[in-house]
Image: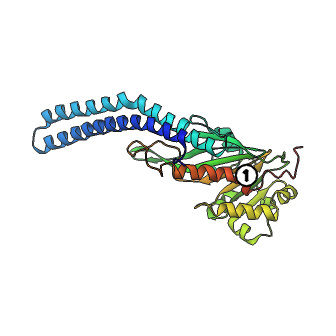
Amino acid sequence: MIEGNIELQTVLAKLELNRQKIAATQKKGYLFIALGIAVVIAGFVMGLPVPAAVAGLASLIYGGVVLYKISDELKAYKEAFKIEVIGAALRSLDKSLTIEPYKGILEYEFENTQLFNQTADRYNTEDLVSGTAGATGFYFAEIHAEYKTEVQTKNGTNTEWHDIFKGIMFAADFNKNFKGVTILQPKDLFSTMGAWFSKNLFSFSNKDVISLENTAFSKTFITHSTNQVEARYILTPAMMERILNLNHYTKSTISLSFINSKIYIAFPLSRNYFEAPVFKTLSNPDLLNDDVAVIKFMYEIIRELDLNTRIWGKT
């Protein structure tokens, strides 16, 4: 990806100078903070707590000031990496592709996918990538949605945060205004129980569970729909095979919904993509391999699911 791409090489060379400066400054700040902590500990061990506390605090404050002063440059560097480096990588794949680091999929749209049974108490989204593949418009973004539980203890309220979803949400035009909602969730204990205790915008009942002829598909997903006839038109034998094939490329089972005129696919991922390295050189030829791989994977979904074949018109 980097070799032979003059635009990328030029941008990376410029950003590498910024990275080196930021990395050196951050190391300096962290060093003074570590030194301050060490001085305080040593002072208490040696019976000199007051002078050690003064010297250690001075070192801690200086280290904090160093890190604070470089924070704006660090933010600008990370933003430039996404817009210029990731942006160039996107354009090399398809000129229609763009990235907006501070935008994402809004919480109301995430909830409207009806893929998850829990309302988010904390929601973050970033790195909105959008474009077209053939005749099909699509977009995807990183999302981290969490809910909290609170337990009363003798020491007060203990709050814990739990993941609802962490990964990439993909959305594409399906070229049909669906009359119902069709949802595919991983067929495991949690999802099966979630079907009974759903907190989605509408509640499923037994009649909404669809039995499909593809055995492998039925073992992988539990399928619900408010319109069984439409669901079977969507989930043709060919489409089920394509979804299974798409799922084979992921470590965790994906979730899908067909709602309004869109298909949504949730890919659970633990890694945060498109982030600029600080303590690793930008000259590494393998620098963008993982980021480019996920971009290509999302772009190829259109072809994988054959979404450019317009078997319906929007009605």
Tell me the quarter of the image containing the C terminus.
top right
Where residue 277 appears, as percent x and y from the top left, is 43, 43
Q: How is the image coloured?
A: rainbow
Residue named by callout 1: 302
Q: Where is residue 5, by image quadrant?
A: top right
Q: Residue at x 69, y 63 (%)?
A: 245
SS state under label 1: helix
Q: Tell me if mark 1 has few (under 14), some (14-19) or many (20+) residues whose alpha carbon lies within 10 angstroms of its own.
A: many
Q: How many marks?
A: 1
Image side of residue 274 versus residue 53, left or right: right
Residue 164 drawn above or below residue 74: below
Where residue 87 appears, as percent x and y from the top left, is 58, 39
Q: Residue at x 40, y 34 (%)?
A: 18
Q: Residue at x 79, y 56 (%)?
A: 225
- Nearest the eye: 190 or 205: 190
Where residue 142 appears, as percent x and y from the top left, is 58, 44
Residue furthest left as drawn: 47
Q: Residue at x 65, y 38 (%)?
A: 106
Where residue 115 appears, as percent x and y from the top left, is 68, 51
> Does residue 224 show up?
yes
Image side of residue 144 versus residue 228, left or right: left
Image side of residue 132 versus residue 68, left or right: right
> Does residue 124 show up?
no
Residue furthest bottom as drawn: 215
Tell me which amino acid carries mark 1.
Ile
